[in-house]
Image (cartoon, rainbow, N blue to C red):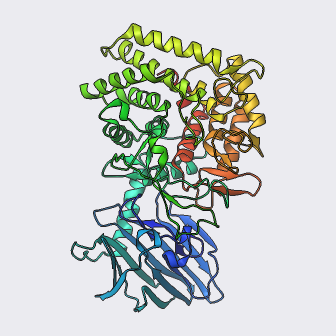
Amino acid sequence: MGRDGSIDWLCLPRFDSGACFAALLGDEGNGRWLLAPAAGGLSSSRQYRENTLILETTFRTAEGEARVIDFMPPRGRRPDVIRIVEGVSGTVEMVCRLAARFDYGSSEPWVRPVDGGFDMVAGPDQLQLRSPVELTREGPNVNGRFSVSPGDRVAFVLTWHPSFDGQPDPVDAEAALAETESFWQEWAGRSTFSGPRPELVARSLLTLKALTYLPSGGIVAAPTTSLPESIGGVRNWDYRFGWLRDATFTLYAFYTAGYFEEAVAWRDWLLRAVAGRPDQVQIMYGVLGERRLTELELPWLAGYEGSKPVRIGNAASDQFQLDIYGEVMDALHLTRSGAPLDDDAWNLQKALMDELEGRWQEPDEGIWEVRGPRQHFTHSKVLAWVAADRAVKAVTRFGQVGPLRRWEALRDQIHAEVCDRAFNSDRGAFVQAYGSEHLDASVLLMPLVGFLPATDPRMVSTVDQIGTELNENGLLRRYLTGGESVDGLPGHEGAFLACSFWWADCLALMGRTDQSSEIFDRLCGLTNDVGLLSEEYDPVAGRMLGNFPQALSHVSLVNTAQNLCPGVLGPAQTRPEN
């Protein structure tokens, strides 16, 4: 919810469903739900209840003070959004203005009265709003006006259900609030984390849980689409899917904080998603493992602050990215000791290795999903080495049966080639791609996956140069855009927050803990008023960029916090040795 009391983005019943409120990417005519003082103005404060996803927004007006409590109960088949208005002091006149527009703000519903509220229906979607407030229909919208004084609590319950399915049962808002608070506090209480910035780590873990589609265990990169990487630019992508590249980082974040059930659910989603022919493995999937993620543009939406086009789906799902073999092998390797894999999983891994052996020397689009020509990206080759390394360890450490000598030879061959072709001796640094002169922050992962020690002179030189050349106001860009940039897109982007966390991780491994902690603290200071991070940040304008909240940013925050725990071996120390 925004500071003005409006919910401007809501997709139901799934993260990747069509939005019924899309004002975030257009205007109020594309759907929103405002619940705020009639006098208008922004909230004076927002906060989550401790260790929950219950948002409390306080409005102070000349007449008094009111609080709006927003939450979604743990999802059932018919998801609810519940808003409770609480009077705090004085008497505050409030307004409710609900404009449902299905299919990303393009479809006006029929609005029909029901007991205690209104139904809104268009095509397969139906919303029902119930409240004790007297609501009125104004065209396709539902409005209401009421006042609250100290002790008053007025509830609004919005429920989605299929339009062909019967009416939803009434929800007791206060009982749902108590159950939701208990659910989240119990879940948060399972954390075993005991390091720096515990409140932000807890918020990050709660965010990752919130980005999980419970029926499948799949985790979306973000719940939004088309929030721009540059205001007014075209770098606007749909992130409501699960990326394989995030798998191992996510598993470590859950594992090291004691959330084994969530880690195994994510691992099992991964296995189901990639099941089948190894040459058909994709870089991303839908929340149930869907493969067809066709990219479309929505011309009726003006875009966030005029940033067009607005896109749904993601054409990068059709790209070839060599690094996914390493991510899948590493993720399954990590969970093998805690949650044994069956024979089908090992057969899948062997098939993936066969595919990798035939393709690792091909160019690809790389971790950043460039829309320019394919290249021999350094990160991609390093992750190909990871795949071979984990296959070898599956045989030598876990007793799996496989062509050990062949995989050892492949591992050595890839390692030698990367050291020879990806290291630019003139620059004294590992570069973005074979033969390139450009730096890329993705090579910071080399010591984090065990390819080279962080203290190797080549890595030290590389980290130092990245920390200088890609640095803007203390944050790292992925690579330099514009000019001869590899990504094939116009314009620029902000600093990529995960890369800055990786920078801190490398410095910690190099023994520069003071510098690492300084970067970590700077990144923690970028969270918004309720502890959330986007994908990118504009260090000059001082604002967030990209889709929000971003799973990889929060995963990286958790992992870096673990890496900086005194006396604890975090992911940066354990992943290379596993």
The answer to whether residue 235 is visible is yes
Q: In the image as oriented, which residue stretches furthest toward the front?
A: 373
Establish if 521 lies above or below 467.
Answer: below
- Which of these two is toward me, 58 or 141? 141
* Rendered location of residue 548, percent (x, y): 55, 56
* Rendered location of residue 240, percent (x, y): 45, 53
Residue for point 35% across, 27% down: 336
* Rendered location of residue 121, percent (x, y): 33, 78
Q: In the image as oriented, which residue stretches furthest toward the top?
A: 405
* Rendered location of residue 409, percent (x, y): 46, 9
The answer to whether residue 570 is visible is no
Q: Please give left or right for residue 126 compared with residue 503 in the image.
A: left
Q: In the image as oriented, which residue stretches furthest toward the left?
A: 166
Establish if 331 lies above or below 68.
Answer: above
**Residue 176 quadrant:** bottom left
Q: Please give left or right for residue 258 compared with residue 514 in the image.
A: left
Residue for point 30% across, 39% down: 272
Tally of numbered discs: 0
Residue for point 59% across, 50% down: 535
Establish if 66 lies above or below 456.
Answer: below
Residue for point 58% across, 12% down: 416
